[in-house]
Image (cartoon, helix red, strand yellow):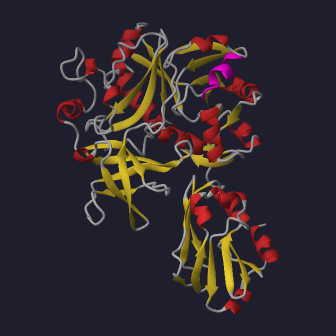
Amino acid sequence: MLKYTDDHEWLNVANGVATVGITTHAVEQLGDLVFVDLPEVGATLAKNDAAATVESVKAASDVYCPLDGEVIEVNDAIRNDPSIVNSAPQGEGWFFKLKLADASEAEALMDEAAYLALVG
Amino acid sequence: MDSAVVMKKTPLTALNIALGGKMVEFAGYEMPVQFAEGVMKEHLHTRAKVGLFDVSHMGQVILRPKSGRIEDAALALERLVPVDILGLKEGRQRYALFTDDKGGILDDLMVANRGDHLFVVVNAACKAQDVAHMRAHLSDLCEVEELTNRALVALQGPAAEAALAKFAPEVAGMAFMEVRGVQILSADCIVSRSGYSGEDGYEISVPDRAAVALVRALLDNPDVHPIGLGARDSLRLEAGLCLYGNDIDRTTTPVAAALEWAVQKVRRAGGARAGGFPGADVILPEFEKGAARRRVGIAPEGRAPIRGGALFADETSAVPVGHITSGGFGPTTETPVAMGYVDTALSAAGTRLFADLRGKRVAVTVATLPFITPRYKR
């Protein structure tokens, strides 16, 4: 199940775990990423907590946690090479995996059609 | 974009938009912050080939001596800058600073001796104030004429010479900081071999009506790409060059700013024309005793850019020992780069300090500027 937030995160939910990243639209706005700060594995995050920070050549931006959960894995590859996020934001450039406190909450988030309508 | 704000345009604004520039307000002007390539690629392209920058927002001013003698214009301008203008030979350009009575810096500028007049280029954000300042203090000896009918184009990078020499072969023979009147595509241009990127290159003052044709002709060369203000900033930061308003301002003196090289011996204590500029009583003693703080390069450890904020001597102290004035990611160095001011006792290269980054202390090292090896034409 692919869902979106109005802060331009995407999450792909399967078996109670959400893989989270930032959208193609977000990456287009940010420009070339030069630094990604990821959460600690094991961290418990609440919805809308600042979960990660990305720095582009222009500015820093926060990535928010889309739902309550525990971070069970982070994508070290993008730490070492943030340009992966630019080239594949909704694939290889994922940020972290979140074991959801309540997977049913994902239902309420935007689907792809709604998100694409939002960003026009 | 706020439609209530009417931004000024340069002779190249329409072309910048047509070229895909992402336009922002800068110093009251509608300027491209980047083009389709993006800041990173634009920066790297400039270091590899040639970048073309519209810098027409900057102020171009002529100081014409009423006596007809260039020495009178030079001596007049020396009242406002701690720089040897009298010794500036015809066809040469030099970096200068307007200082205030407290020894602070009002603006930085370029001054060229054009034979029968001085040609001055000042920052966009300061130009109205600079022109008023020159009119107030130089009008007894000079006509102060702002040139509002010319564009300014910077061509920077290792292939800049080849790109411009195609239209004006004589520019190949110019030395760093040389200035000449040059006909380019039948337009009367003023060309200097200088820039703000750490690369070889030129700044070309061109009549506004000829600017679009010149830029289009230069861009026909696949080596030449249009570059926005974003990459202009990262290029100058890697090159260790000051941005007025960030790295130098009214609170920084020339010695604190590590710009001693801009004050020639003849204007320092013991020199033939020592002093005689605003703030000399503050500035000249600092050449002997130093300033309390000093501008240095700051190399953050890790990959996170540090764009501002306080610097500390250790991981726990609450009292800052300095602050960052410019920072970002260096596409060429592939590291974060920054500059800032630290207590002079902590200004030696290699000194380890800590910066505040989103509430965390990040280790940084005082670094020698520039971060890259400049490739100016010598």
Q: How many marks?
A: 0
Q: Residue at x 23, y 40 (%)?
A: B291
Question: Percent from the top left, x then y, of residue B245?
Answer: 42, 44
Residue B87 drawn in magenta: no
Q: Residue at x 47, y 9 (%)?
A: B116
Q: Nearer the viewer, residue B179 or B43?
A: B43
**Residue B26 percent across, percent down from the top left:** 56, 45
**Looking at the rendering, in which quadrant would you find the N terminus of chain B?**
bottom right
Query: In terms of image quadrants, where is residue A103?
Result: bottom right
In the displayed structure, would residue A48 be above or below residue A58? below
Q: Position of residue B229 (x, y in %)?
A: 59, 42
Q: Residue furthest right?
A: A113
Residue depicted at 68% across the width and 36% down the height: B226
Please, what is the dominant secondary structure of the magenta stretch?
Answer: helix
Residue B2 can be seen, yes or no: no
Question: For the point 73% across and 67% down, which residue is it?
Answer: A91
Residue B73 left/right relative to B343 = right
Question: Which residue is nearer to you in this view: A89 or A120?
Answer: A89
Residue A46 vertical position relative to residue A28 in the rendered view, above or below: below
Residue B30 position, x and y percent, is 63, 44
Looking at the image, residue B178 lies above or below residue B307: above
- Residue extent of the magenta highlight: B157-166
- Taking the image as shown, residue B55 lies to the left or right of residue B178, namely right
Q: In the figure, residue A64 lies in which quadrant? A: bottom right
* Quadrant of the rendered image containing residue B156: top right
